[in-house]
Amino acid sequence: MNVTDLKKLLTPQADQQADIAAIVQTLKARQEPLDIAEFVKQYNPANHKALDKTIRKDKLIKRPTGKVSEDGKEETQTSYVAVNRQVFPLQKLIVERAVSFLFGNPVKLNAEAKSDKQKKVVAAINRILYDNKINSFNRRIAREMFRSTQVAECWFSVEGDEAHSDYGFETKFKIRCVAFNRWDGNEFYPLYDETGDLIAFSRAFKRHDDEGRTINYFETYTAAEFILWSQNNGTWEQADRIANVIKKIPVVYGHQEQVEWQDVQWSIERLEYLLSNFADTNDYHAAPKIFIEGKIDGFAAKGEPGQIIQGTKDSKAYYLSWNHATDAVKLEIETLLRFIFSFTQTPDISFDSVKGLREISGEALKMLFLDAHLKVQNKREVFDEYLQRRVNILKSFVAFMAVDLKKESSTLQIEPEIQPFIINDEKATIDNLMAATAGKPIISQKSAIAQSGLVVDVDAEYKQIQEEEKIARSFDILNPSTI
């Protein structure tokens, strides 16, 4: 079955008794399945290899029993000693830092809305995004993509009993969205035509019925309709089929080639191995060890003050010292950490790394986070297209809910702009702006009061300041012109 035949079967006029199993199999065959289990293990520290006793085995110890066997050999007793197993959530840290720098600030919508109807379209889209808590939603979307390479979101309308004007016009519909991710067992199957346009998006998932049986579901979104199939006892059947009111696939699909930590996975495993071994070494050498030369006649009792070790003439006793034994291990650990942060373009902004920094300028902050911002620019190759498709879907929903805004919804250009996270140096910004205006004020006193965040009633506070300045000028007898 080729793409042309498949498109015919996915149209509303298609034969309802078509071979559903063949359609599902064809849709699935157009993308190789992704093994998400390995990513889950790597992301969760509890599943790291260092904790696996079949990989990092306990230490086998043989101790003499003091008995001699019949063949004259000393008998030994075998036991196991638990070894240290150190794991670290570096994969999570890499993902979370990438999410924070990408969507630490809200996405800005740029639109040259001139007419009232165009402004209504922008206002409606902003309200839809606000109602769906889009800032937090963006972070969840990015997190899912970074840790599983694939993510999708679906927008849909919910019709209520009464009309509302939340979007700037009366409608009974509310626009909602839901995120699909691989972590929850979803499988994604996008279908593109010869020109690279998405002509269908399919999702496979499982649910349990009231009797505890597992039922396989396969749903497909096209520009014409939504189709849901279910498989029970090995037989596929159509469970639902709904017309698509916006005539556009309401799904946004995004993917990247690999998880964020893939290039440094081996380095993380090596770091955990080194630190686990180092912990074992510390346990072994934690208690002081005494090396004795010659014959010792006796030791002092435990807890006895002024302890003395008695020995014969020329006997010696001294503590073993551990000179420079850890330098090589320390160097490798520090190198691995540096490579892990560097190769993933993850800034090390832990307390120990930044505690020595004094107050630095805005330009210095930009240089400090330069690598992270360059990573954001790389991510825009995926997320610019992703966010733009989301906006286009919402424009179609606005046109569906408000017919009089249909033209403006289709012609108005709205471009989402990602704003990377940065610690703003407001003092440097103000100094630069005042230098550009030759030292003149750049905001009014009332605006400064509002931005201070120290007062509740800005107008009352501004009026009080004006009254106090008027009183102060009335006592300025040396300058009558101010009275």
Image: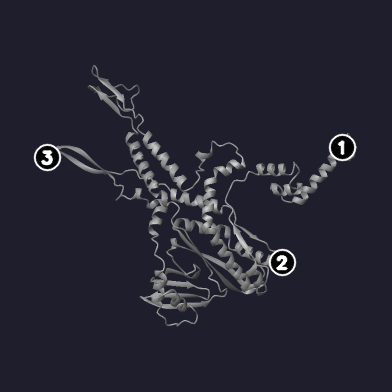
Q: Which mark is residue 115?
A: 2
Q: Which residue is mark 3?
A: 69
Type of amino acid at the residue the image marks with label 1: Phe
Q: Is residue 343 left or right of residue 424?
A: left
- State yes or no: discs 2 and 1 in contact (Cβ < 8 Å): no
Q: Position of residue 318 (x, y in %)?
A: 30, 24
**Label 2's element?**
loop
Nearer the viewer's eye, disc 3 or disc 2? 2
Residue shown at 43%/69% (left/top)?
204
Residue type, mark 2 in image: Ser
Is the N terminus in the top left, top right, bottom left or bottom right quadrant?
Answer: bottom left
First in sequence, mark 2 or 1: give its number. 2
**Distance Cα–Cα, label 3 vs label 1:** 111 Å
* 434 to 161, vertically: above or below: above
The first of marks 3 and 2 along the sequence is 3
What residue sits 50% from the left and 42% below the top? 350
